[in-house]
Amino acid sequence: MNYDTRYPSIADLKTRAKKRIPNFAFDYIDGGIDQEDGKLRNRRDWHDILLTPRYLKDVSHADLTTSIFGREYSMPFGVPPVGLGNMMWPGAEKALATAAQRNNIPYVLSTFSTTDLDEIAAAAPDVCWFQLYVPRDIDVMKDIICRVKSAGFHALVITLDIPVGAKRNRELKNGLKLPFSLTPNIVWQSMIHPVWALHTLKSGQPDFVNVLRYKKNSNQNLAEFVTDFNMCGVTQERVELIRQLWDGPLILKGVQYEADMKAAIETGIDGVVISNHGGRQLDAAPSTVQSLQQLGSYASENMTIMVDSGIRTGLDVVRAKSYGAQMAFSGRSFFWGMGAMGHAGAEQVIGIYHDEIDRSLKQLGCAGFDTMDKTWLA
Ligand SMILES: Cc1cc2nc3c(=O)[nH]c(=O)nc-3n(C[C@H](O)[C@H](O)[C@H](O)COP(=O)(O)O)c2cc1C
C-alpha cells in the first residue's frame, strides 16, 4: 500500500490540515472538552504501552487480516462515525466510504452525517456500518432502523456516551453553530482558506441530511434540533428494544464501565467499542487504555472488543490487540487526512496505518495480527 512520503505520519497530516482549513473546522476536529485533559490522557496511555520484540524468526510476511461479525477485513483499523464530516472537506464522507470499500475496512456512518445514507451504502456496500444516536421518539428510531436495514448497512452501532450535549470551549469561542452564522471570524477564516471555501461554496453548506425529515418545528435551528432529537441517556430497555428490531451485528459504543459491559453481554450485544468519544464528553473519564486493560478480557466468540480514542499510529493498533481489541478506529486521523490532502487523504491515512501495523508486527516477531496478545507486553 502506498502513501505520499511528504506526510509520513498522522502528526504530519495534522500540521498540514491546520494550515489548509479554517480554524473553526480544525478546532471542531481537534478539540476536546473542558481543559482537554482527557484527550491528552488518551494519547499518553497508548504511548506508555511497551511491547517486547522477539527475534530469531522469519518475518517476511505478516497477516493483517481480521475477522469480525462474519466478515474478513483487510486490516484491524476502520473509520469511526464523525458527525458533520463534510465540513472538514466537502465530500469527505463519501470519499472515506469509497476508500474504505476499496481497501476492505469498516466505515461507520454517523447519524449526524452530512451525506445521504443510501449514497454511502451504495459507495461502501460491503463495509458500511451505521452509528445510531438514539432518538427519544420511538417511531423516529424505528423509521431510521428500517431505512438503515433496507439500505444494506451490515452493523448497527449505538452510541451511549452523549447523555447530554457537550460544552466544547473552542466551538463556543469560534461561534460554530448550524446553520453557519456569518460571524467576522467565520467570514475571515473562509477568505484566508480560499481552496476550502471554493470547494464548500460549490457543494453548499453541510446539513444533517439523514435526520432533517424528523424536524417538527421549522424555526428550530439545527443545534436545538440535535438537543431535542437525542434521548437524554440511552436506557437498557431501549437497547433491548433495538436488539429485537435489528437482527444483524449490534454494537455499543462508549463502554468504559464493567457493569455496562456485563449488561451488553446479557442483552446479546455482539461487540463494544471502548471509547470516550476522543475526550470530547467527560474530561475526567479514564483513558480508553485504562478501560481496555480492565475490560479486554471480556473478549469472546460472542463479544468482539474494539477501541478508539487517542490512536495515532499503526503501533497503537497493535498495542490495542495486546489487550484484546480486535479492531481499532480513529476519527481525528481520518479527518486530519482530509483537511491536509482533500479526498486523497483517505488513501493516505489507510496507507500509513497499513504500513505501520505491518512493520510493527514484523518488528515484534509476530506472524499475524490475530496472534498478537498480552504475552508481548513488557
Ligand atoms: C469531530 C468529531 C465528531 C464526532 N462525531 C461523532 C458522531 O457523530 N458519533 C459518534 O458516535 N462519535 C463521534 N465522534 C467520536 C468518534 O467516533 C471517535 O470515538 C473518536 O474520534 C475517537 O478518538 P480520536 O479522534 O482521538 O481517534 C466524533 C469525533 C470527532 C473528533
Image (tube, rainbow, N blue to C red):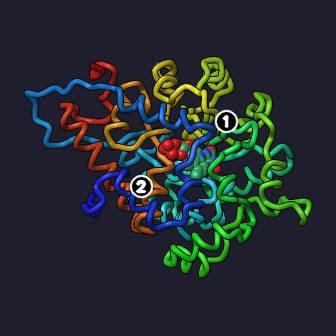
Q: Amino acid at mark 1?
A: Asp
Residue 242: image location, x then y, percent: 74, 38
Task: Pick the quarter of the image with the C terminus.
Answer: top left
Q: Quadrant of residue 35?
A: top right
Can residue 149 be seen here? The reply is no
The residue singled out by tag 2 in the image is 14
Left or right placement of residue 236 versus residue 322 in this view? right
Instruction: Give the structural element (helix, strand or loop) at label 1.
Output: loop
Quarter of the image for residue 162 reads: top right
Q: In terms of secondary structure, where does tag 2 sit? A: helix
Q: Is mark 2 within 8 Å of ligand 1?
A: no
- In the rendered image, the vertical position of residue 202 relative to residue 368, given as above or below: below
Residue 306 visible to an observer of this rendering:
yes
Percent of width and height locating residue 78: 46, 48
Look at 22% across and 24% down and name the residue there.
52
State yes or no: Cβ of the residue under disc 1 lies below 8 Å from any atom of ligand 1.
yes
Q: Is residue 135 above or below residue 121?
A: above
Location of residue 212 with respect to 143 vertically, above or below = below
* Mark 1 nearby-residue class (10 Å; few <14, some 14–19, many ≥20): many
> Would residue 261 appear left or right of 226 to someone viewing this image?
left
- Say left or right for 278 vs 16: right
Q: Which residue is mark 1?
A: 161
- Mark nearer the viewer, 1 or 2: 2
Circles 1 and 2: CB atoms closer than 8 Å:
no
User: Which residue does the image show at 22% across and 32% down from the upper left?
Assistant: 366
**Residue 62 appears at what percent x and percent y?**
22, 41
Report the front residue among 169 and 320.
169
Residue at figure coordinates x 65%, y 18% from the top left? 259
Label 1 to label 2: alpha-carbon separation: 26 Å
